[in-house]
Image: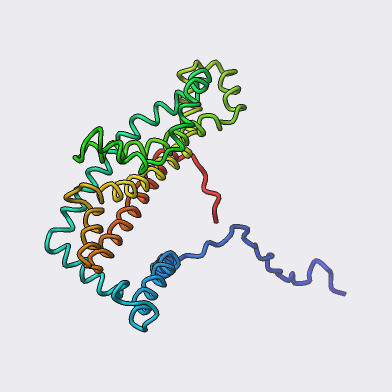
Amino acid sequence: MVDVADRPTRLVPPPAVVSTVPTVARSGPFTRLAGLGGRALHRTAALAALAAIWETAPRVGLVDRVFLPPLSQVLVAWWALLTSGQLADHVGASLTRSLSGLGLAVLTAIPLGLLIGWYRPLAELLGPLLEVFRNTAALALLPVFVLILGLGETSKIALVLYACSWPILLNTIAGVKGVDPLLVRSARSMGLNHLRLFQKVILPAAVPTVFTGVRLAGAYSILVLVAAEMVGAKAGLGYLVNYAQYNFAIPDMYAGIVTISAIGLVVNQLLVVVERRFSTWRVDVTS
């Protein structure tokens, strides 16, 4: 008999250790570039489709190319205006008026909106007056501004100021009034005075709504100014579009319209960047 102790011991390999740490897929530079390219293609697909329709519809006879020339012809006219310096002069005149009116609207409407939204007696006093003027279109008051301030720069900047003030003012009031009451009561229970409460709670909570009004005002500043420049102006994108239409320079007219759209898009994107800078505490829940 062989003793059990004398039998050779069979070595059993230890069980494999399964790592519970999730493996992270390493994305190379080509994968990242492909992802960026896919997102860029997704965002520009609609614009590319519009450009393709605009180019092909006049050429195949779906629309009269005299009144709607192909996009390539419009771009040629736009480049001619740019190289001649005319487009830069018109864009400079329009941006000066538009940004001046928008800046004045931001400086005046935001503080006034904060006061009206925070102090109820002031809101009850100015409420009927605001309701009267908010329903009065800015372009309906264009003759009034021209009669009082003349045909110069002052009337155009004042019209832009009036048009831009209302979306900023109303959204600021709505932003202050829409602050969660629980946040206000919690801040007061912690001993914050009115100034600190306004600085730490009211303003951060109202920032997204305020910037919504500023973005709307940025669009209004371009649209209203273009209409104002069609009356009694010697420079500006509105003057360019109106002048080209009267002289039947249809490609130049569409070149001015495309420039107006591009400026509106750039202004909106700049305001989005500024909004993100002032509301970094927000969490993006969109997928």
| Residue, far left | 84
How many numbered badges does the structure rendering display? 0
Residue 52 vertical placement versus 285 (above, below): below
| Residue 52 % position (x, y) | 37, 75
Q: Quadrant of the C terminus?
A: bottom right
- Pick the front one: 186 or 239: 239
- Location of residue 80 (image quadrant): bottom left
Residue 98 vertical placement versus 130 (above, below): below
| Residue, far right | 1
- Pick the front one: 219 or 179: 219
**At 73% across and 71% down in the image, what residue appears?**
10
| Residue 17 % position (x, y) | 65, 62
**At 23% across and 34% down in the image, what residue appears?**
149
- Pick the front one: 147 or 30: 147
Direction from residue 253 to residue 271 in the image, left or right: right
- Location of residue 244 (image quadrant): bottom left
Q: How is the image coloured?
A: rainbow
| Residue, far bottom | 60
**At 56% across and 32% down in the image, what residue appears?**
178
**At 35% across and 36% down in the image, what residue appears?**
162
| Residue 228 % position (x, y) | 28, 46
- Pick the front one: 18 or 138: 138
Q: Quadrant of the N terminus?
A: bottom right
Direction from residue 160 to residue 192 in the image, left or right: right
| Residue 6 % position (x, y) | 78, 69
Direction from residue 114 to residue 10 in the image, left or right: right
